[in-house]
Image (cartoon, rainbow, N blue to C red):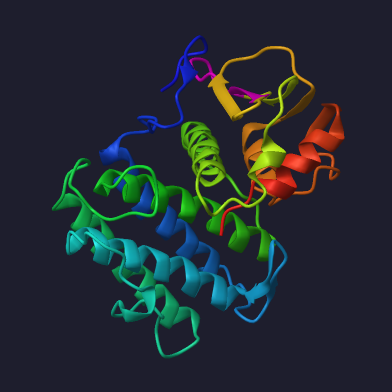
């Protein structure tokens, strides 16, 4: 992980939790998503954090993304493969909890198997800055974390994630935003530039040994970040899970779970501009 004194060069991906841990977390996250479905959740319920989707659609989207990544890794794809051409990516024919549960269980097993047959440095096409199986192991871990949060909150259940996983998700999200900002996809990238401004994320409940501070500084050519504290134009603080969800726009800033100190407009600008997909 990044120490509090090292600035992260965002053109080089962080080590994250490591390939083996990401592979384990994928299976755990899918199992937890299955538990949400088993709780009696209504598949027709609209998902508040993804209002265009029902819970059924959210689960199919999430499992489909995992199946797509599985296909890319298993086939050692060197160019993009449309998700709609991947067998089983659309989900089961029946919209029942039982059908979705069986499909998710198979989805988890297939990705774990595909990653087990590859290594973190195995060349695979990705849309990102690193074209390896390791990229997909990390990306699918946090795709599942965030969409499990969507499903859990839609079901009215409490959401929890391990601190080190939440921290890795924040690291990865900053890398993604940086990559999108520097790519041709980012038409609004200049809004994340301009020196003299900074944003601090601070977890108030991080366990010993986990540096859960992120200092984002804006410069004329974009932004940089490092793990560690410091003075900032605006600070977002609260329990680590809530900071993660707020920074991913899964919780409102004004629901009492997080605190914003300083220039709220800068944080609002970040949340508006720093999007993906």
Of 172 and 100, which appears nearest the observer?
A: 172
Q: Is residue 178 placed above or below 126 in the rendered structure? A: above
Depth order, front residue of 207/242: 242
Residue 212 in the magenta stretch? The answer is yes
Q: Where on the picture, by quarter, is residue 224?
A: top right
State the residue at coordinates (49%, 42%): 179
At 52% across and 32% down in the image, what residue appears?
A: 167
Q: Give the range drawn in magenta.
A: 206-218
The image quadrant where one finds the N terminus is top left
Figure quadrant of residue 213: top right
Can you give x and y, in whole percent of width and height, for residue 181 in the image? 57, 43
Left or right position of 1 against 257: left
Quadrant of the rendering where the C terminus is positioned: bottom right
Question: What residue is drawn where x is 57% and y is 68%?
Answer: 39
**Is 251 placed above or below 233 here?**
below
Q: In this view, does 82 lie above or below 233?
A: below
Where does the image place residue 133, in percent across and percent down from the top left? 25, 49
Quick check: 238 left or right of 223? right
Which residue is at 41% across, 73% downward? 101
- 200 is within the stretch colored magenta: no
**Residue 196 screen position, x and y as percent:** 75, 19
């Amino acid at each position: 992980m990044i120490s509090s004194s090292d600035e992260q060069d965002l053109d080089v991906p962080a080590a994250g939790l490591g390939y083996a841990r990401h592979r384990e977390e994928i299976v755990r996250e899918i199992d937890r998503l299955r538990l949400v479905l088993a709780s009696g959740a209504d598949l027709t319920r609209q998902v508040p954090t993804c209002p265009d989707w029902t819970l059924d659609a959210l689960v199919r989207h999430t499992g489909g993304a995992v199946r797509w990544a599985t296909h890319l890794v298993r086939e050692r794809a060197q160019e993009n493969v449309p998700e709609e051409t991947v067998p089983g990516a659309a989900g089961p024919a029946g919209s029942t909890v039982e059908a979705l549960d069986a499909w998710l269980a198979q989805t988890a097993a297939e990705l774990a198997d595909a990653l087990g047959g590859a290594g973190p440095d195995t060349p695979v096409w990705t849309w990102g800055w690193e074209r390896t199986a390791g990229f997909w192991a990390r990306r699918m871990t946090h795709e599942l974390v965030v969409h499990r949060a969507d499903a859990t909150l839609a079901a009215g259940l409490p959401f929890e994630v391990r601190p080190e996983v939440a921290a890795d998700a924040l690291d990865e999200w900053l890398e993604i935003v940086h990559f999108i900002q520097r790519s041709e996809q980012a038409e609004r990238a200049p809004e994340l530039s301009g020196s003299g401004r900074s944003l601090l994320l601070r977890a108030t409940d991080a366990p010993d040994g986990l540096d859960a501070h992120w200092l984002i500084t804006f410069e004329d050519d974009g932004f940089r970040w490092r793990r560690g504290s410091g003075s900032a134009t605006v600070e977002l603080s609260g329990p680590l899970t809530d900071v993660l969800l707020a920074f991913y726009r899964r919780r409102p800033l004004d629901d009492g779970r997080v605190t914003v100190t300083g220039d709220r407009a800068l944080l609002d600008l970040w949340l508006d501009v720093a999007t993906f997909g």
